Image (cartoon, rainbow, N blue to C red):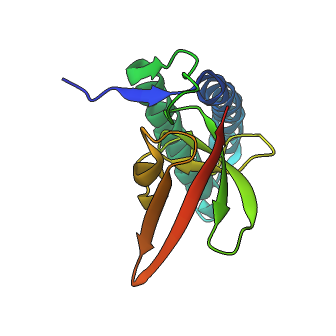
């Protein structure tokens, strides 16, 4: 059985938009390939081969997006008492600097179209934050560096 992918509503919508964009690109690539096939001669088929490779890349991306969407499970609105998928978390670091991150699934991390940076729930920071409450402190080790953060708020 294929592994389900937990996503936020925004992440699911982004995947759908990406799929539609890739399908449009695939239609265009197919049209170009057909045109080149009809006009290509045997001596200069580099354009034709490049068009074939581009079409294959787009087909693979369409397949990947369709697979992700077929396995996607949209998470309900996240509760705000503990950090879970979809929450925006305000943190302070050891220096007292405050910042926000949104905890999302790996396929959404870094690519959601929001003002708040997104981090994967499978990243070191994401793992440390999951299930935490306001006021909790977490330590995140990346390599040999360990940084402490305090959860200020969860939205």
- Quadrant assignment, res 15: top right
Residue nearer the viewer, 12 or 65: 12
Q: Position of residue 138 (x, y in %)?
A: 46, 58
> 76 above or below 111?
above
Q: Quadrant of the N terminus?
A: top left
Q: Position of residue 132 (x, y in %)?
A: 46, 42
Give the left or right position of residue 141, taking residue 39 as reference: left
Q: Position of residue 80 (x, y in %)?
A: 59, 26
> 7 above or below 136?
above
Q: Quadrant of the C terminus?
A: top right
Residue nearer the viewer, 21 or 150: 150
Q: Position of residue 47 (x, y in %)?
A: 66, 58
Residue sitting at x 64%, y 34%: 22
Residue sitting at x 65%, y 22%: 13
Extreme residue toward the front, this view:
135
Extreme residue toward the bottom, this view:
144
- Quadrant assignment, res 19: top right
């Amino acid at each position: 059985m294929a592994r389900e992918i937990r996503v936020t509503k925004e992440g699911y919508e982004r995947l759908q938009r990406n799929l539609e964009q890739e399908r449009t690109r695939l239609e265009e690539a197919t049209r170009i390939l057909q045109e080149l096939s009809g006009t290509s001669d045997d001596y200069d088929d580099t354009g034709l081969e490049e068009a074939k490779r581009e079409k294959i890349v787009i087909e693979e991306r369409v397949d990947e997006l369709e697979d992700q969407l077929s396995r996607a499970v949209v998470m309900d609105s996240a509760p705000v008492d503990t950090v879970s998928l979809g929450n925006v978390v305000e943190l302070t670091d050891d220096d007292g600097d405050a910042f926000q991150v949104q905890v999302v699934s790996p396929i959404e991390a870094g690519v959601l179209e929001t003002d708040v940076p997104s981090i994967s729930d499978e990243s070191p920071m994401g793992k440390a934050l999951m299930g935490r409450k306001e006021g909790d402190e977490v330590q995140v080790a990346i390599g040999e560096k360990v940084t402490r953060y305090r959860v200020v708020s969860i939205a």
